Amino acid sequence: MNARTNKVQIVPEFPPLNTEKEQEIILQALDKLQKGQKIKVDFTEDTTFENVQSYFTEQDYHIVHFTGHGVNRNGKGYLVFESEDRTARLIGNKTLADLFSNMGIKLVVLSSCGY
């Protein structure tokens, strides 16, 4: 990996979805860029919100692709992350926007379904 390599963080879902196919499609689409060291793709394994935050503070990512569940409560949208006690934790758009903007993320892809 060189200084011009863009880093992509993939944040899988909680509760589990069948995302293996989506991950495979992403890796196939980015294969040439990875081989040319233009991009490096990481997959998050522990998807508590605290762990996701630490991924962004420990390394510099340029792109985030979130695949998971979303909910609408009282007209506001939330993404569903896993809590330390393995229950659902709703994270609102302001919290996410603050996290991503403070970390210098350039592109965020949110792929969520109703839960």
Image (cartoon, helix red, strand yellow):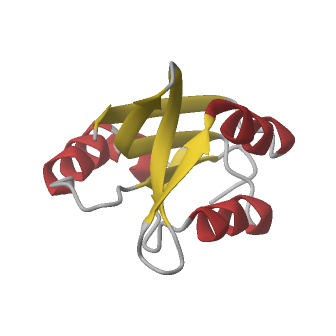
Q: Residue at x 51, y 24 (%)?
A: 74
Quadrant holding the C terminus: top left
**Vertical relation: 3 (above or below) 42:** above
Camera-side residue of 43 and 34: 43
Camera-side residue of 36 and 66: 66
The answer to which image quadrant residue 17 occupies is bottom left
Which x, y percent locates residue 34?
Answer: 43, 50
The answer to which image quadrant residue 29 occupies is top left
Residue 50 is left or right of residue 109, and the answer is right
**Vertical relation: 28 (above or below) 42:** above
Q: Residue at x 59, y 46 (%)?
A: 91
Residue 40 in view, yes or no: no
**Vertical relation: 48 (above or below) 69:** below
Find the residue positioned furthest to the front.
74
Camera-side residue of 31 and 87: 87
Residue 10 is left or right of residue 69, and the answer is right
Quadrant holding the N terminus: bottom right
Residue 55 in view, yes or no: yes
Camera-side residue of 109 and 50: 50
Find the residue positioned furthest to the right.
102
Which x, y percent locates residue 9?
Answer: 53, 52
Find the residue positioned furthest to the bottom.
85
Which x, y percent locates residue 110?
Answer: 45, 32
Which x, y percent locates residue 68?
Answer: 35, 46
Q: Residue at x 21, y 45 (%)?
A: 22
Q: Residue at x 76, y 51 (%)?
A: 3
Count of marks placed on residues: 0
Residue 48 is left or right of residue 97, and the answer is left
